Amino acid sequence: QVQLVESGGGLVQAGGSLNLSCAASGTVINAMGWYRQAPGSQRELVATITSGGTTNYADSVKGRFTISRDNAKNTVSLQMNSLKPEDTAVYFCRITTWYTKYIYWGQGTQVTVSS
């Protein structure tokens, strides 16, 4: 059974930092990533990282957010710096399994940035 456990959300002032973490278990993982959904908006890509370490970022977070993963521990992290009020959203961890290419989502963690 595949499980994703997220942690690290919270409330922070603009300009501050947060680190999100997601631990996966129960499968062999290919890509990992973070997505976010603000109220009234569609879920959008924040950052992804392949098993080989290739990263991809949304233009809105480039230079401020850093995604990383530990393949031995099946974890993916998102270091968020210079946070802005527009970064406020529920952040979701997503994985793609290696063999079947199934997609799994975490339960989401709230990030709120106050101005």
Image: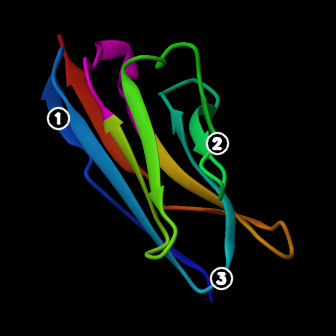
| Image quadrant occupied by the C terminus | top left
The answer to the question of whether label 2 and label 3 lie on touching residues, with beta carbons closer than 8 A, is no
Is residue 57 left or right of 6 when viewed as pictured? right
Residue at 59% x, 22% y: name it.
58
Residue 102 occupies quadrant: bottom right
Residue at 33% x, 48% y: name it.
20
Which is more toward the observer, 26 or 66? 66
Report the label total. Answer: 3
Q: Nearer the viewer, mark 2 or mark 1?
A: 2
Considering only vertical position in the picture, is 98 above or below 90?
A: below
- Which amino acid type is shown beneath numbered disc 1? Leu
Considering only vertical position in the picture, is 34 above or below 65?
A: below
Disc nearer the start of the sequence (1/3): 1
Is residue 80 left or right of 43 when viewed as pictured? left
- Which amino acid type is shown beneath numbered disc 2? Thr
Residue at 50% x, 49% y: name it.
92
The boundaries of the magenta stretch are 80-90
- Which amino acid type is shown beneath numbered disc 3? Thr
Q: Nearer the viewer, mark 2 or mark 3?
A: 2
Q: CA distance from mark 1 to mark 3?
A: 32 Å
Tell me, for residue 54, which label it has, or none: 2
**Which residue position is annotated with label 3?**
27
Residue 71 pos. (x, y %): 52, 68
Residue 24 pos. (x, y %): 50, 73
Mark 2 neighbour density, 10 Å: few (under 14) some (14–19) many (20 or more): few
**Dot 2 lies on which element?**
loop
**Which residue position is annotated with label 1?**
11
**Dot 1 lies on which element?**
strand
Residue 93 pos. (x, y %): 52, 54
Is residue 58 left or right of 86 when viewed as pictured? right
